[in-house]
Image: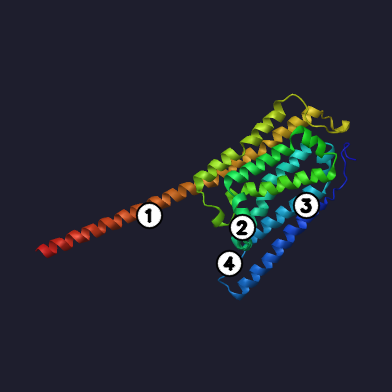
Amino acid sequence: MLTGLSLAWSWSPGGLLCFVVLALLYLLRLRQVFRMHQEDPQAPTVSKIRIASFVIGLLLFAVLFFSPVHTIGRTQLFLVHMAEVVVLTTFCAPLLLGGCSAVILRPVLEIPVVSTVIRFLTNPIVASVVFNAIFLLWHAPKIYNAATPNVALYNTMMLSIFLASLLNWWPIIGSLSELKKHGYPLQMLYVILDGQPLDIFAFILVYSGVALYHYHIPAQTGINAFGDQAAAGALLLLPGLVDLVVLSPLFISWMGQIEQKTRAADQRRLEEAMEYDEDEDNVEIETI
């Protein structure tokens, strides 16, 4: 052990199944897309950047779920657990979702029942409520303290939070335009409001003054129970900073959209004015 921390690797059957299913579905669909593009060069394809994004997200998922990080987060340090959750939901999920272009995901909408469910779950209000509810319910002290001794239950918690985070990111970076009918102002409002419940929870962890979670923290770390919890709460504020980063391109895109509409309106007014002048000239000529 290094400073008392466990170096045991974690082999989560649910995590492994999720990893394999994501990888296989993506590879099979990618193969179909490339084959169609070879037959018809005009057919849409998937960029190398998107493929790299998905691969990096998948590797990050594997490192988090199968390395000692997962073991330490479940048994020894709440700080490490929160670090794993933050990386999964703030970096891994958007990387995976960003790697799925519209041509990859569109066949899903061709299945009527699945399409109906996805359309409902990707609604911004539903996506936000589902993610925040799942996250906060699992971290209710009684539920969380019951989950950590049970490997299967803890893994279920982590997978459900991860899958919910994919929904949570959809209103911002989802690639299917059919499922994104809200404009930039609503997207920015979504980003601002969506993170508020977790920010409040983070402040509770930092300022409660009482350790809410039961961990066997190694004495070698020099961390007490509340210090571990407070550090985890401070770390949970990181997604709020990421939200600020996400807001910038949304705001810039919104300003660009407004400018484009303004130019188009000015152009229409100019064309209408020119047509009006031409009509007046024609009337004068006919009068003469």
What residue is at 63 percent from the left and 58 percent from the top?
A: 113
| Kind of residue at disc 3 | Ala
Q: Earlier in the sequence, mark 3 or mark 2?
A: 3
The mark found on residue 62 in the picture is 3
What residue is at 87 percent from the left and 39 percent from the top?
A: 5
Return the x and y of residue 202 as percentages of the image width and height: 68, 33
Query: Quadrant where the N terminus lies?
Result: top right
**Separation (CA) of disc 2 from disc 1:** 36 Å
- Determine whether the residue tagged by mark 3 lies in a helix, strand or loop: helix
Q: Earlier in the sequence, mark 4 or mark 1?
A: 4
Q: Earlier in the sequence, mark 3 or mark 4?
A: 4
Q: Say if residue 43 shows up in the picture.
A: yes
Reading the image, the residue beneath label 1 is: 264
Reading the image, the residue beneath label 4 is: 44
| Kind of residue at disc 1 | Ala
Return the x and y of residue 7 as percentages of the image width and height: 87, 44
| Kind of residue at disc 2 | Ser
State the residue in front, 10 or 142. Answer: 142
**Separation (CA) of disc 4 from disc 1:** 29 Å
Examine the rendered structure and indicate whether residue 252 appears above or below residue 275.
above
Mark 2 and mark 4 residues within 8 Å of each other at the beta carbon: no
Reading the image, the residue beneath label 2 is: 115
